[in-house]
Image (cartoon, helix red, strand yellow):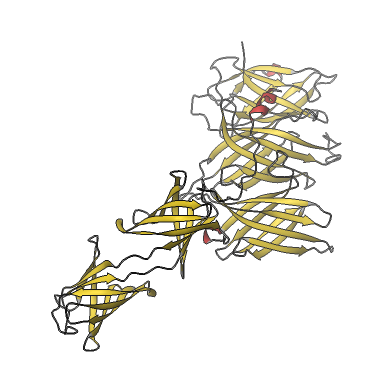
Amino acid sequence: MKYLAILSSLTLLACLAPPRLVAQTVPSSPIGQSFTVTEDGGGAHLEDTLEFLTATTGREVDPEGDIDSFTYTYNVTGANTAEVRAQEKPDKWSDYTFTFDGSGGGTYVQRRFDDNEFKDQRSGDINEDSGAAGAPADLVGVTIELVEAAEVEESERLDFLTGDRGREVEPGDVDPFAYTWQVTGASTADAVLTFKLNRKWDEYTFTFTSDTGGTFTVDRFDKGRFKDTKTGTFTLAENAEILDPLASGFYDGVLDLSDLGGGDDDFEGRFRIRVNRRGNFSGRFKLDDDNFPLRGQFDDSGHHQTQLSLRDGTSLDILLEMEAIETGFKITGSIDDDSGQSFVLDSDQRVFHPTRNPAPQAGSYTLVITGDGSPAQTLEVGDGAAIIRVNRRGIARILGRTGDSTPWGAAVALRQNGDFTFLSDLYRRGGSIGGRMQFQDVAGVSDLDGVLHWVRPADFGANSRNPLYQAGFDVERTAVGSSYAPSSRGDLIIAIGDGPDNLGVDFTEGGLTAPKSFVATLNTRNRVEIDRAEGLRMRLQNRTGFFNGRFVDDSGVTPQVRGFFGVVLQKQSNGSGFFVGDGVTGPADLGPVVP
């Protein structure tokens, strides 16, 4: 069939998870790594200047000229000591203790509060111009310069969790950041850590002197202005605490008997859980036609292991691992049963949002599941047909029929790289269809493709008027899809020449003693015109891309009416589907008439 030529152009997906980063002189990506940075002790430096303008108001001026107004209270506590509370906002203030030496100098201790909580404490020297022998009686018109004492700050850790997200961990505080990373030389790299867009960020230069450490310089910016420069040393290690609030959310995935990194996806189950910001999770998974609830908690390393006891006395050993990847997080692991089978788990965090991060694949598609399989698969079957609608949340809803005329549907979340995996029950849960689909542009062929595993049990529908495939089957099928847009008024649903006898409709195999071909006219209202005497009736649905109809099969002793169903592929300017013959189905194809 025509799709055999497509097989060589399809890319079978490998496992999305990148290998764990092994430290090297300069890692190409810091994902999964932690940089512990320790600042050098520096000399004393001017921190701020306090200007007391009236008996209750003043302003704080930093070295870059940024000004913050405050109200204050002043209390003399001794001959040389006084206290000031400078209130910038209802929930933000500083408490100062000043000790004056009587000659324009002295010392201070500053305790800072923000969001009504203690933030940190600083100390150093003061330069003041009150002219008082000890503590001034009041501060009206006085200026006090704060010169912060030299100190070495406690080490802090920079965790690089995903391709653009991380967190700064210091004693009692965790701040998330977005980042960019650039290797700048054989032993150097730059990282820009943004805490508040256009307001607060740090610009690091890391110089590696070994595989696991080196020196750094950081320029710090606050309120959009340069604040100061710090230097120090850093050590590099694999991040042992992968669990992070960023990892919360829904995870959807599949269970596979084979290695997900290979080309043979034999999906046997589904997996879906929700993880909260504390690492607790709840959800369920489906395996061997049974559904199992699942609850637990990930530890700080993103690890969870448990055993699930079943009613029949057997048990399942469950191992879950949270991993950071380029675009977010994923959960991998395994579920092992008592018979020795091991099911590999592969699930992705839902990351798309209709406004903050809409799925770029959002739109409508038509899909053909071709009758072509590997050379060893000689099953005679028509092409399955479906429509796919992907919303801005990244949820793909599929509706159609397999090549043996079985209705099916699925709703699945797109993975973070935009592809999706699914497993849909068929034949009253006696069979299934599932696999991995990838959105990619193959010129003139498709916008998405993949390989699907399709299982039909023996003897299904044996009592029907036309029982199909009573021996059952277990096969793989190529799937190709095209983006779809309803045609505008006056335009054809597929790109074929406008005019009479422009559409060919062909039926092959499916028990026919000879192929059946029809020539029809597709008019500008997207209606198929053909003489009734030809024995073909057909309808195209402009809104969805489906087509259906019936034709007279006069290849046997007694003429039979055969129904058919399919979809158009706008990218190929044709359409494919199936018709139902006696005990089997065959391909139904439409396309432009070639002179």
Please determine whether, in this image, residue 398 is positioned above or below residue 150: above
Q: Nearer the viewer, residue 94 or 308?
A: 94
Please determine whether, in this image, residue 373 is positioned above or below residue 128: above
- Rendered location of residue 117, percent (x, y): 39, 75
Give the quadrant of the N terminus.
Answer: top right
- Rendered location of residue 331, percent (x, y): 63, 54
Q: Quadrant of residue 300?
A: bottom right
Please determine whether, in this image, residue 142 is positioned above or below residue 400: below
Position of 264 compared to 458: left or right? left
Residue that appears at 24% across and 85% down: 81
Residue that appears at 77% across and 36% down: 475
Residue that appears at 55% across and 15% down: 499
Position of 387 compared to 140: left or right? right
How many numbered badges does the structure rendering display?
0
Q: Nearer the viewer, residue 112 or 572?
A: 112
- Rendered location of residue 506, percent (x, y): 70, 20
Q: Nearer the viewer, residue 388 or 444?
A: 444
Residue 234 visible (yes or no): yes
Q: Nearer the viewer, residue 451 or 61?
A: 61
